[in-house]
Amino acid sequence: MNHTGVDLIGSVFAQAKSENRALLIGYLPAGFPTLGESVALVEAMCDGGVDLIEVGLPYSDPLMDGPVIQQAVDQALGNGATPQSVLTVVKAVANRGVVPVVMSYWNPIEQFGIDAFAHELQQAGGAGVITPDLTIEEGQPWIAAAGGQDLAPIFLVAPSSTNERISRICQVTQGFVYAASTMGVTGARDRVSNLAPELVARVRASTDLPIAVGLGVSNGAQAAEIAKYADGVIVGSAFVTAANAGGVAGVRELARELAGGVHRAR
């Protein structure tokens, strides 16, 4: 069996669909709070029931991230996190039998070397890359490099995206479509945006790809709410908060709560 990155993402969504549930996707920055601890944290996420893990590549100017993730990224960078740290964490996730993708701003990938990054990520067991600040117009070199390594290039749609724009993004995205449910920066919220269901419906009109909703989920009840209409539920800031408050045990506990929400939603 040829396990390309695109196939790995497709198979994990297909498995969840066969169980009549959405996928639980968790995010943590590599190297937070230290490289060794970040490996332990992602392993706890895997143990707690996260189906796919976004490994963040720490960057000094994370424009879209809210204060919780920014602080975690600063801590990782202060402790010496590099793109190599990301590959180490990706490997740890893949070794647990969970699908890893990287979430990265464009600048660090460009600095590393586009083809070199794609090659090394594929070698580490990575399945794709989410690039929140890369437009599809400027993304052609990355789309080509990712394709050469069978990695999924994953782009974002937002409530402000026109239907025409959504259609064009869906034509080049592989693996899944990342639907950002709120305008503005990321962060856990008391209420999940009511813009998400409409956005998911608009994306469904353009593609058969799975759609994962991110930004704002912090507990099992919210995860269950989104899992009723989306194929994937993405959680980031809440995992950072859990790591800060309760370390490995806190992260595992949150993963279990969120997985419970996703599993019971339908």
Image (tube, rainbow, N blue to C red):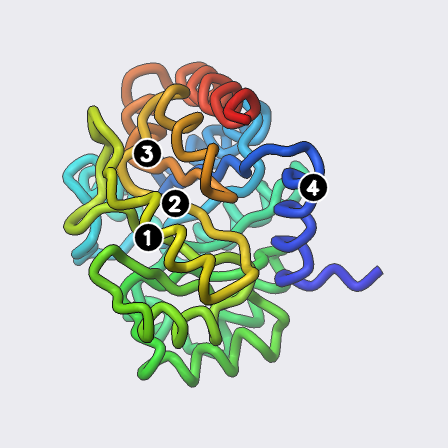
Q: Secondary structure at mark 4?
A: helix
Who comes first in sequence, dot 3 or dot 4?
4
Residue type for callout 4: Gln
**In the rendered image, which residue does mark 4 sit on?**
15
Mark 1 lies on residue:
199
Residue displayed at 45% across by 23% down: 258
Dot 1 and dot 2 residues touching (CB under 8 Å): yes
The quadrant of the image that shows the N terminus is bottom right
- Where residue 117 sits in the image (x, y, percent)? 48, 70
Whole-percent x and y of residue 177?
45, 58
Identify the residue shown where x is 54% and y is 42%: 52
Q: Nearer the viewer, residue 48 or 194?
A: 194
Residue behind mark 3: 33
For marks 3 and 2, the one nearer the N-term is 3
- Which kind of residue does numbered mark 3 sit on? Pro
Which is more foreground, mark 1 or mark 4? 1
Instruction: Give how far apart the Cα atoms at labels 2 and 4 are.
Output: 18 Å
Residue 78 in view, yes or no: no
Q: Secondary structure at mark 3?
A: loop
Q: Is residue 236 above or below residue 44?
A: below
Q: Which residue is mark 2?
A: 213
**Left or right: where 79 falls relative to 170:** left
Q: CA distance from mark 1 to mark 2?
A: 9 Å
**Is there CB contact under 8 Å for labels 1 and 3?**
no
